[in-house]
Image (spheres, rainbow, N blue to C red):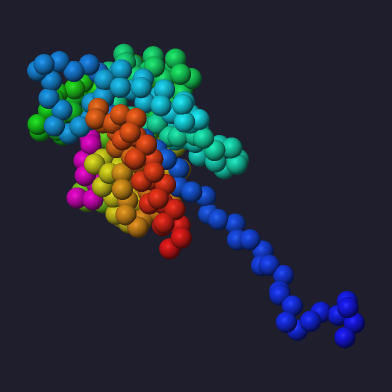
């Protein structure tokens, strides 16, 4: 056998490397940003102080990360430029966003997605029976948030568990809320956020059919894709150590899911 003849026992050429699916992006879920007082109770863990939010933004910077809106994150990832970006979301649309969160986001050159309730403009969070009572953005407040460069998304009309309502109400929560926000800010929202993080296939389908490009949940289980984006709940208790653990937990969970 000549030297340039392949031996039957010669190793095969390595198979082409399989291109991995993109890792699920890390998206943080905030709600209210305000100061605590001695009389303040926070039974649902939805409040962080401005000082804590600033510490979180500084922690992201120290880790080489940068907070952006979900639409900005999705566009960057689609263009291959998503490395180091983290999604920032604020649910419910509390008025304290403009007073406390917005100045900090602008100081650190971050953007965020604010999921609002166009059926409760200027109202309050009556869906939280234990309180505390918090006021919601008015139409003017939502327009001001959008004008400041933040993304406005829909949280439905009235903050209902959409898995428990009939098809007619579900359609209203998805479609009508999108239409009202289109009228308010001049552009139809790209994103939807499931109240309480509750979704099933029927709810997901209604949101997709309403024209949204993506939807955020909390932990959607085995449901995946752009209409079931997981998020990490953030509370006042989250210091640097807890943030680091939550980041690692997110990476481990969705790397494992990718491998299955």
Q: Residue 156 location, x and y as percent?
A: 29, 37
**Quadrant assignment, res 52:** top left
Task: Identify which residue, 68 or 115, lies in the foreground.
Answer: 68
Judge by depth and name the residue closer to the eye, 185 or 21.
21
**Figure quadrant of the N terminus:** bottom right
Asked if the stretch drawn in magenta spans residue 17, the answer is no
At horizontal 71% and vertical 74% (from top left) the residue drawn is: 12
Asked whether residue 233 is in view, the answer is: yes
Q: Position of residue 56 (x, y in %)?
A: 36, 26
Which residue ends up furthest to the right in the rendered image? Answer: 2
- Relative placement, left or right, of 164 versus 203 is left
Would residue 234 be found to the left or right of residue 1 on screen? left
Residue 122 in percent (x, y) is at 23, 20
Horizontally, residue 81 falls left or right of residue 130, namely right
Position of the C terminus by quadrant: bottom left
Residue at 26% of width from left, 20% of height from top?
Answer: 49
Q: Is residue 171 visible?
A: no
Q: How many marks?
A: 0
Looking at the rendering, which quadrant does residue 2 occupy? bottom right
- Residue 112: x and y, percent? 41, 27
Q: Give the residue drawn at x 36%, y 22%.
A: 55
Location of residue 212 by image quarter: top left
Residue at image coords 15%, 28%: 42
Vertical comparison of 37 with 214: above or below: above
Foreground residue among 94 and 28:
28
The relative height of residue 141 versus residue 4 in the rendered view (above or below) is above
Q: Is residue 59 above or below residue 228?
A: above
Give the residues in magenta: 158-164
């Amino acid at each position: 056998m000549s030297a340039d003849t392949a031996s039957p026992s010669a190793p095969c050429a390595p198979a082409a490397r399989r291109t991995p699916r993109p890792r699920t992006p890390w998206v943080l879920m905030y709600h209210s940003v305000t100061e605590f007082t001695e009389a303040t109770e926070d039974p649902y863990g939805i409040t962080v102080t401005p000082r804590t939010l600033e510490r979180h933004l500084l922690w992201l910077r120290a880790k080489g990360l940068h907070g952006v809106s979900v639409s900005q994150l999705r566009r960057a990832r689609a263009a291959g430029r998503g490395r180091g970006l983290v999604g920032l979301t604020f649910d419910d649309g509390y008025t304290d966003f403009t007073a406390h969160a917005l100045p900090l986001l602008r100081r650190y050159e971050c953007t965020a997605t604010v999921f609002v309730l166009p059926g409760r403009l200027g109202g309050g969070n009556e869906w939280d029976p234990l309180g505390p009572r918090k006021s919601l953005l008015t139409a003017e407040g939502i327009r001001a948030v959008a004008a400041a460069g933040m993304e406005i998304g829909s949280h439905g009309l009235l903050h209902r568990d959409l898995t428990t309502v009939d098809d007619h109400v579900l359609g209203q929560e998805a479609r009508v809320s999108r239409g009202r926000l289109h009228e308010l800010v001049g552009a139809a929202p790209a994103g939807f956020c499931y109240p309480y993080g509750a979704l099933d296939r029927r709810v997901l389908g209604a949101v997709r059919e309403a024209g949204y490009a993506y939807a955020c949940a909390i932990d959607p289980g085995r449901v995946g894709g752009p209409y079931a984006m997981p998020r990490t709940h953030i509370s006042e208790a989250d210091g640097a150590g807890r943030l680091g653990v939550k980041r690692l937990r997110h990476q481990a969970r969705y790397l494992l899911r990718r491998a299955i």
